[in-house]
Amino acid sequence: MTIATLNHRFDGPADAPVLILGPSLGTELGMWDAQIPALSQHLRVLRFDLRGHGRSHPVLGTSSVGDLVGDVLTLADSYGIKRFAYAGVSLGGAIGLWMGVHHPERLTGLILCCSSAHFGEPQGWLDRAATVRAKGMREVADTVIRRWFTPEYITREPAAVQRILDMLYACPAEGYAGCCDALAHYDLRAELGRVTAPTLVIGAEQDPSTPVEHARELAAGIPDAMLVEVADAAHLANIQQADTVTDAMLKHLVGHA
């Protein structure tokens, strides 16, 4: 396993319980900006860029979700953080679920937002990786952004949408493609019962990337998981319905972080 050095930042009191936030594929740690003012009042929030994304170290070739988990655990270990709560969107959520299955002793709480135990057939991800490697991020970014926000939100909040689109444009093609490879081979559907951390699952009712049925499957399979379904939001629900998602996160984490 090759470990990548992750760009990261802390917010919140140095002596507060730690919450690590994982971003979605193709974005950067700034995708969580709307949650930080509220979360950092109670928690020491650690955000990071995925390997090969933003300002994180690139790793050439294919990656697995287990590799991405290794990056995060190495980052936590570098600060002596042994136990923490974790929340992630989409691929960021997959990282958290992998931790919950394979490293349960590290987690005090878990939030899976617009994520899944399985993101579809491998070939679709392998094809997307090949497209990006051959033609660059602009070949897929405009299509992706229309799956991440509802049409009404795109019309109403063009600046917010453009900010995320700019992250996609700026994402190194190899970093994005390597994470597509990771998603192609990720499937934890048979392992959900191994998660022991108190878990909140958040699904979005208009999410075409991880339809709300994926959230329901996670909540049904993870022991004692709680489920929140967010109306009027697509894949990046933490941005489109920031207050609703933040409130749900706080209710879950303040007792478990």
Image (cartoon, helix red, strand yellow):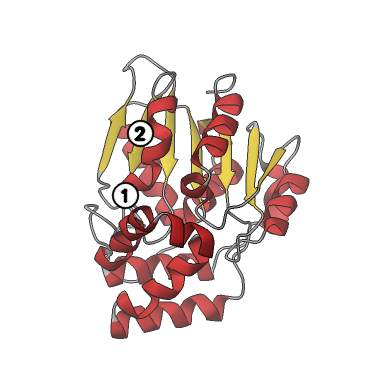
* Above or below for 249 versus 68: above
Q: Residues within 10 Å of mark 1 (few under 14, many from 20)?
A: many
Kindly tell me whether residue 150 is visible in this rendering: no
Q: Secondary structure at mark 1?
A: loop
Question: Which residue is labeled 1 in the image?
Answer: 49
Which residue is found at the position 52% from the left and 35% from the top? 243
Amino acid at the residue labelled 1? Asp
Q: Which residue is mark 2?
A: 46
Quarter containing the N terminus: bottom left
Q: Nearer the viewer, residue 243 or 175?
A: 243
x, y percent for residue 256: 58, 22
Q: Position of residue 85 (x, y in %)?
A: 50, 30
> Could you classify mark 2 by the number of other residues whose Cα lies within 10 Å: few (under 14), some (14-19), or many (20 or more)?
many
Depth check, front residue: 192 or 86: 86
**Residue 198: where, in percent of width, then height?**
65, 31
Q: Residue at x 40, y 48 (%)?
A: 70
